[in-house]
Amino acid sequence: MSAVTTDEHLDSAEGRAEGMSMPLLGMVLFIASEVMFFGGLFAAYFNIRADADEWPPAGLEHLHAKLPAIFTVVLVLSSVTMHMGVMAIRRGNVRALVRWTAITLVLGLVFLAGQIYDYSTLEFTIRDGVYGSTFYTLTGFHGAHVFGGAIYLFIVLIRAMSGQFSKAHHAAVEGATMYWHFVDVVWIALFFTLYVLK
Amino acid sequence: MRPVGPRLRSRLRLAAVAVLPLLLTACAQQPQTEQGKKVYTLYNITLAIAVLIGVGVISMILLSCVRYRKQPGDESMPPQTHGNTVFEVVWTAIPTVIVLALFGMSFVTIRAIDKPSGNHAAIIEVRGYQWSWTFDYGTNAAGTRVLVKTESNRTPPQMIVPVGEKVHIEQRSDNVMHSFFVPAFLFKRDLIPGKANGFDITVTSPGVYHGQCAELCGTDHAQMTFSVKGVSRAEFDKWFNEFRPPLPKCEDTAKAATEYTVTALQGRAEWETPCAYLKAGGPVSLTMHNQGGLPHNIAVFEGPMTENKPVGKPGKIINSGSDTVALPALEAGKDYRFYCQVHPLMEGLVKVSP
Amino acid sequence: MTTVASRPSHATPAPKKRSKIVDYLTTTDHKKIGVMYLYFSFFAFLVGGMLALGVRAQLATPGGTMIEDPDTYNALFTMHASAMLFFFIIPIWAGWGNYIVPLQIGALDMAYPRINALSFWLLPAGFVTMFSGYLMKGGPAQAGWTEYPPLTAARFMPGYGTDLWIVGLLLVGISSTLGAINFMVTIFKMRAPGMTMFRMPVFTWNILVTSILTLLALPVLTSALIMLFIDRNYGGSFFDPGVGGNAILWQNLFWFYSHPAVYIMILPAFGLISEVIPVFSRKPLFGYKAFVFATIAIGGLGFSVWAHHMFATGQVLLPFFALMTAFIAVPTGVKFFNWIATLWQGKITFESPMLFAIGFLTMFLIGGLNGMFTASPPVDYALHDTYWVVAHIHDVLFGGSVFAVFSSFYFWYPKVTGRMMDDKLGKVHFWITFVGFNLAFFPMHMLGLEGMPRRIASYSANPQWAFLNKISTLGAFIIGVSIFPFVYNLWKSRKGPIAGNDPWKANSLEWWTSSPPPVHNFDSLPQIRSERPVLDERLQREAEAALAKGASA
């Protein structure tokens, strides 16, 4: 007796061609690993914060949230504009894609500039105990991800301008959008954890 | 059913021989504390179950290998069984029951040995250093601080406990992680910088039990040994009340000068010789030469460092090289000592000659 | 007649002859990358093995006279573990995964061939970085492969060795993460028509679960490594209790990865064993679906047991982690029963791959059973950080993973090279390894029970441990000797008998194509109607042949 089963499950390539495209699935998995990376950093932060007698430690004020709140709005807005861009290319509108990507890129850079300015106003450094270590590591690694995302957006922009994307072929735009949303979500979590939560 | 062949029987015998050493291991360490005895019982139950499962499963593997080996010339296909739900449910259930039973027993034992209780015959604070221990019992009736540590001849420190009484061990470290491990107690617990840890032991019979650090703590981790000595109550009280902190003997007074250099050994928390010979009467200086590998400084105190009577200013903490401290005039016959404040175990005697 | 779907050839014809070395350096072919993984990991195995012999030579006498400086000894076992875990066992399964998984699911290549090449090349880069510590003042990392702070803080462990270890491991981490994504997308997206998830070979299933574990666990280690690096180099204080940091935090983050990492090392071995046992018993794997679910269960439970490495710290929730750890025994037990039921009523032959698979069953069983002791917190109080744990890890990773690695070499060598390995030499190799393994690691149980801590350079205070240590050292050197017939066999068999497509009468798709497979993997594919398409096809042909014979007669 052999183990031959019926042919009804010849599900095949079509089954798999449905759903997410290969590049996009790769991006989703990559983002999953990034979530775990930030999960490790957040776990460290909450662990240390729970251990501390005072937070922020004596001698330091609670971080001012006003300016970062403005930059948070900027980053959330950039997520919206990027979404507009991807919606445009899904309809095949390349010119709108270029416009929205450029706006997103500028907003991203404004956010980075804002973060650097915010750093310059702070009275503590990464060397000043756990408070400084956690703050700069978490925001620094987020900043690095924004920077990486900006490079990605820049490449998308160049490719869009040279007409490489169309209604059918724009996986890189979908990937960039997804990544940009992820970076945005991480920031919102960081903003509430570091600046708002008392 | 086919008869069991002689070849199979010899293989089963082989399997039994292979399991024999496992049985022998049960006798390796006899527990010497009440808590250890509970662990020992649990260990033996686990061992019995493990041996049973091990012998059963290995026999099944060998049996099927022997019984179902392909006969020469037989090219037919064996029955193609894909599974059997009843069997599969049963053999998921069996290990589940076994592990739940073992977990239950573990849980009861944890509660029995890790339960904090109020009545202790003594509270001993154990501190771990790179690479030795101190056992601090507090002060005795005579006002002497009973602090046991490595003596200058490098004999490992010995913790003395009364037999049959519950002793609480508090654990502290302000450097790296260590682990307090006495094999005969079937117990260890880590010393963690920044966290208070502790446990109870009740040593059941007199004797000297070897202990050592079980958490890698750097270069001389292997040398970080100690012992626990169980003694009668009377003997313990006598030792506790007559405790005198041991000090190095420094007899080489001919070396006395107004400037003296002591050397911290390369990579070790140890002085080359724990003696400094200085002249009485006028200002003198003491130089520490650090051969490197560890940070050290030198500080001179009158009496034990814990009494906090510094003489002169403590030196700088340096990773290598030399550092000199200037000292005011010292009096012959007084008890001066020098320490590395990074490694308080590095204690030496300042011998002052007229 | 069975329909045979033919595929267009995607092979790019080589325009001009390139040297073989340039070809391998620039390749994106999953088979060549797989072979490079195998070469590299086997090299790391030899390096790690030499370091292990150094460790054993030192411990043969209580005084430990071979190595004067304990730091040198500490570096020895640290680098031994690092080489074996990060550069041998994990990547060698990535190597076989690379070579075999696309073949088993009927794919042309991995999903992202260039990222695949990058994953491989990051490994030697990580190896060179980590081992360049030997050229630095102060030597390489020497705080054990667990690198617990505060011992690894800059003030207790100065020098570049630890930093190079961190950076080397970060590179390995990127390599593994990219590899995991690649495997997952390949398996989800590139299966041949008819290859449903529940018709995938078990090896592929196990590589899939392994990849999920890597993807979700490894980034946490990455974050911990970065924090340690910041602590050491930029004045951070994550793990420094002096300024509010938490030394236990490292252990939590480290084991959150490193416990699943144990499954990352053993699950592919389970997969391989589950390919070999059915083939050499001539039966299907008993309870295929239960086996797959058991693999998934082990993977899932793997995320909730990390703190059982920390029972002796007294800082973890004992009952929870003890219970979860105990539960791991259930799916593992299911696997054992499945394997035995597969053997049962089979027609078993004992070629070298099968011999190593049976060796795996018996030796890994010991590793599972002695793990039961340390899963119980009170017993772990006695055994943690003693040689019992060293015995356990080697029973699991040598008796388990390494036996499976050898089995995989004998099993798939014909596929990779087109030639058979010498079976007699293989058996010699097995028996020397088996004897050496038991002599080397069984006495460690007893040493652990007698209280010998791991990671000590000498034991002058306990000369009674010397006898068992000498036996263990003897065993280690026998293992060392066992490598020679294996390497000789690999070399000599390049001119061995021609293997043909399917020398073992096996089940899965890699045996359908030629040995070695063409650049594009398959000229044709059979219909896939079960998890054993090649067997189905063979049986059908035999039936047709018998029918034709009957008709003509």
Image (tube, grey):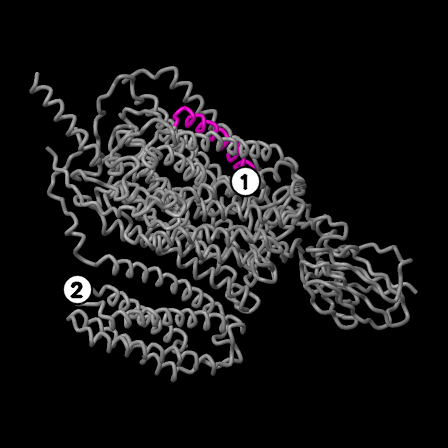
Using the image, name the chain to which the residue with label 1 belongs.
Answer: C
Question: Which chain contains the residue that carries disc 2?
Answer: A
Q: What mark, if any, has residue C50 been given in the picture?
A: 1
- The reply to whether residue B118 is in sight is no
Q: Is residue C298 toward the left or the right of residue B294 in the image?
A: left
Q: Which mark is residue C352?
A: none
Residue found 50% across the figure and 57% down from its top: C166
- Find numbered disc 2 in the image and state the secondary structure of the residue it sits on: loop
- Please determine whether, in this image, residue A181 is positioned above or below residue C395: below
Does residue C448 show up magenta in the picture?
yes
Q: Is residue C442 magenta?
A: yes
Structural crowding at the residue carrying mark 2, measured as other residues with C-alpha within 10 Å and reported as few (<14), some (14–19) or many (≥20): few
Q: What element carries label 1?
A: helix
Q: In this view, does A20 lie to the left or right of C72?
A: left
- What whole-number distance in Å separates the C-alpha atoms at marks 1 and 2? 56 Å
Toward the bottom, the furthest residue is A66
Between residues C422 and C58, which one lies in front from this camera angle?
C422
* In front of the other: B348 or A67: A67
- In the picture shown, does residue C235 fall above or below C113? below
Badge 1 amino acid: Met
Q: Residue B142 falls in which quadrant of the image?
A: bottom right
The part of the chain drawn in magenta is: C422-449
Say which residue label 2 marks: A168
- The amino acid on which the numbered mark 2 sits, given as a three-letter code, is Ala
**Which dot, 1 or 2, sits closer to the camera?**
2
Category of crowding for the residue at label 1, using alpha-carbon neighbours closer than 10 angstroms: few (below 14), some (14–19), many (at least 20): some
Residue B15 percent location from the top left of the image: 43, 25
Location of the N terminus of chain B by quadrant is top left
Q: Quadrant of the C terminus of chain B?
A: bottom right
Q: Residue at x 24, y 37 (%)?
A: C513
Q: Give x and y (percent) for residue A182.
A: 31, 68
Q: Where is residue B329 in the image (x, y as percent from the top left)?
A: 86, 72
